[in-house]
Structures are given as structure tokens and as C-alpha cells.
Amino acid sequence: MYKIKTFNQISVKGLERFTRAKYEVGSEIGNPDAILLRSHKLHNETLDTTVLAVARAGAGVNNVPVAQYSEKGIVVFNTPGANANAVKELVLAGLLLGSRGIKTGIDHVKTLHNVTDASELHKTLEAQKKQFAGNELMGKTLGIVGLGAIGSLVADMALALGMKVVGYDPALSIEAAWRLSSNVQKAENLHALLARCDYVSLHVPAIEATHHLINKEALAQAKSGMTLVNFARESIVDPEAIVAALDNTKLKGYICDFPEPVFYGRSDVIAMPHIGASTAEAEENCAIMAAEQIIDYLENGNIKNSVNFPAVSMARCDGQRIIFSNNNVPKVLGNVLSVLADNNVNVIDMVNKSRGDLAYNILDVEQMENGDVIQEIANVEHVKTVRLID
Ligand SMILES: NC(=O)C1=CN([C@@H]2O[C@H](COP(=O)(O)OP(=O)(O)OC[C@H]3O[C@@H](n4cnc5c(N)ncnc54)[C@H](O)[C@@H]3O)[C@@H](O)[C@H]2O)C=CC1
Ligand SMILES: O=C(O)CCC(=O)C(=O)O
């Protein structure tokens, strides 16, 4: 029986992937084999030593201490692209909220609840509505910082709205480049992008390199009257710099998914409660993808969509499967194979891949007689984790 500990509300469609015959799933489970979570922060949690994998049902893994888990050989998964459409749709709402007096207009209507005569209400609003007029998105320039799963969908959407689109992504993957419309113009650097855009939408991960990417210096380069949209993470902007840029009208508005106390009371900031991925569809997609990745790892040792381990997959043969991870240094695989040879274990098939400092191996072997082989592999220098799957 495998045990899965959950944090946060995980879509039941994903949880249903764990069959009752093989899995025990719940938020109170002790000594789990894997953890399935959304935004719960794991940095202050002491993980049971039984944990083999952590799956983030979502894109951002800034709530998971990935480097620390890599040290322990724990595989960390995310679900790339599974909630991208949900975020894209909310970015559209963000652009519209930033370009028209929608929020202020609605708020204003609410203040008129004492006006009980309908014709008086209509007359009053017709006289006042000019203060809520805005601009159209068509013909304006949208800058997109980060052209991955979400950024590329936002680009397509903006092009369909008749916007000009400029993108910046110094780490664009080949796969992401294939997805990207050729109508997206390339900015040489962030400052060049900021200088020419009416709207800028952020779609980068929260990592050290993107911490306060949008700061005082960056905002000084921005086109005057720009609207900034942030459905990525709070750490990507310096909130004090945003406030200063709004005060000096460099920024016209800031639309985000991450409220901060310094934004309270400002009509030029619209802050939502981190609901970019909060649609039934996105929650389902993420939960299903995360659950399937955990199952394939626990039952077969295959790794797909890990943020710290290489992608490794091998079809099952008859016999037994040994999986092990190790520091990516010479001789480890050779030493493990020697252990198998010394124990007369015949290898049927194998795969070895590395990513950065980590290496990962799947070995299908004929049925072993000696039960101590796994412990002998665990004792090989630089081996981090080893597991036998029957
Ligand atoms: N508001 C919400 O509920 C949600 C927020 N997000 C946030 O959005 C982020 C992006 O999500 P996806 O597009 O799915 O991820 P992704 O991994 O597909 O794309 C991220 C892109 O950012 C690029 N990038 C990295 N560093 C950069 C830099 N310094 N400058 C410009 N580009 C850079 C990468 O090369 C990559 O192409 C997530 O990491 C997460 O923080 C994601 C989903 C929901
Ligand atoms: O699970 C959520 O609601 C948050 C999603 C998110 O921020 C992400 O996928 O990075």
C-alpha cells in the first residue's frame, strides 16, 4: 500500500486516480511515500524520511525547498501548462480592468444604493459615466516577460485582440519557442521591452534571478502611463517601487494576483487573492497530472515533469526493477553494476540519465535470490536513494 499525504484542496478527479486497492490518501497521513500539494509552503515542514516524491499541482515550485530535497534524492514534480489557460483568461480580465473604468464604475454604482428612483438613477449615471471611460486594447502594445506555457497563450490572445506583442525571455526552451507565434516581436532585454509597451504582463517563475525584477531601476525605463499586470508571483515586483511609480504616474495601474498592505486604499491597484489558477478545469488538470506522475514514479520509477530530476522512462520487463539516484560523479553506475554482477543478478534492460548534480537509473533485472542486494547498492558511495519495485 502506498501512502499519499495531501495539502490544500486537491481536485477529487485527481485523487480518484489513486485506486483504493493500492493507495491510502489523506491530509493526516503519517510516513507518506509522496506528497501532493498546491500552494502550501513546505519550507518550514519537517518531512518524514519515507517521502520519495513531492508533486506540486501547479506550475510554481517556490513553495517547495527543491535544492534541499534534491540533496535527499526526493523527486519534485510540477504540472507544466495544466493551469495555463486559466491564468491566460484572468490576464485578459486584468488587461480589461486596467484599460476601462470597470472596477471604479461598479464600485461607484454601489455607492448609489440610496437612490431608489430608477429614472433618477439612470440620469445620474449617464451624467457621471464619463469619469469611467477608458481605452481599447486593440492597437496597443503588450509586453510579455516570460514566454513559457502561460506567456505564449497570453501572446496568442493579445494578437487575436489586435494588440502588438513584444516578448522577452532569455531562457526560452526550444519547446516553448516552437509554441510561440512568429508575430511576437523579440525585445533584446527587459528595459527595451518596458520602454515600448503600454501594458506589460509578467509570466516568469519566482526564482532568485527574478526577485524584484520589476524594481525602481526597471520602472524608470518604462513607457509613461504603462499598466503592469502580475499574475506570476509577488516576489517578482518590488511593491515600494510600484507605489512610487504609481504616485509619479509612470505607472497608470497595477493589476495583480498578490495583494500587499502597501496597496490598500489605492484605486490604481486591483489585487486579486491568488485566483489565477482557481478554475474547476485547471484544478482538475493539475491534480490529474500530478497524481499520474506520482503513480508512475511510485509504481514504475518513471519520471516525467520533474523540476530537479531528469525525465526517465522505461517500459516494464518481466522480473524486478531497481531504481536508484546518485550524485552525478564517475563510477557510481559501474560500482552498482559490480554489486549486481557479484550477486549473479542478470540485467535485462537499463537507462541512466543525469541533470545537473543528480543522476537517475532504472535497471530491470531477473528475479533476485539475494534480498541483501538493495542494501549493498545503498552502501555504494554517492548513491542517494535505492528502491526495488516488484
Ligand atoms: N496566479 C496563479 O495562480 C498562477 C501563477 N503562476 C506563475 O506563473 C509562472 C509561469 O508559469 P508558466 O508559464 O506555466 O511557466 P513556464 O515554466 O512554462 O514559463 C516560464 C518562462 O519564464 C522564463 N523565464 C525565466 N526567467 C526569466 C527571466 N529572468 N526573464 C524572462 N523570462 C524568464 C522561462 O524561460 C520560461 O519560458 C509560474 O512559475 C508561477 O509562478 C502559474 C500558474 C498559476
Ligand atoms: O494552486 C493554485 O491555486 C495556485 C497555482 C499557482 O500559483 C501555480 O500553479 O504556480
Image (spheres, helix red, strand yellow):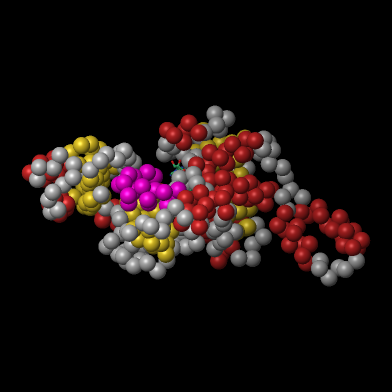
Q: Residue furthest top?
A: 182
* Closer to us: 13 or 156: 13
Vertical placement of residue 175 versus 294, above or below = above
Q: In this orientation, which residue lies closer to the viewer: 133 or 171? A: 171
Q: Is residue 296 magenta?
A: yes
- Identify which residue is drawn at 90% across, 58% down: 123
Residue at the image position 39 percent from the left and 48 percent from the top: 293
Return the residue nearer the eye: 20 or 385: 20
Q: Quadrant of the N terminus?
A: bottom left
Range of the magenta residues? Answer: 289-307
* Residue under the image location 61 percent in, 44 percent down: 199
Instruction: Judge from the rendering whether residue 1 lies leftward or rightward of residue 332; answer left or right.
Output: right
- Image location of residue 82, percent across then percent down: 50, 46
Residue 290 image point, x, y percent: 43, 51
Magenta region includes residue 102:
no
Question: What percent of the width, then of the height, locates residue 147?
Answer: 50, 40
Residue 35 in percent (x, y) is at 38, 59
Q: Is residue 160 left or right of residue 7?
A: right
| Predominant SS along the magenta part | helix
The answer to whether residue 58 shows anywhere in this view is: no
Residue 343 appears in the rendering: yes
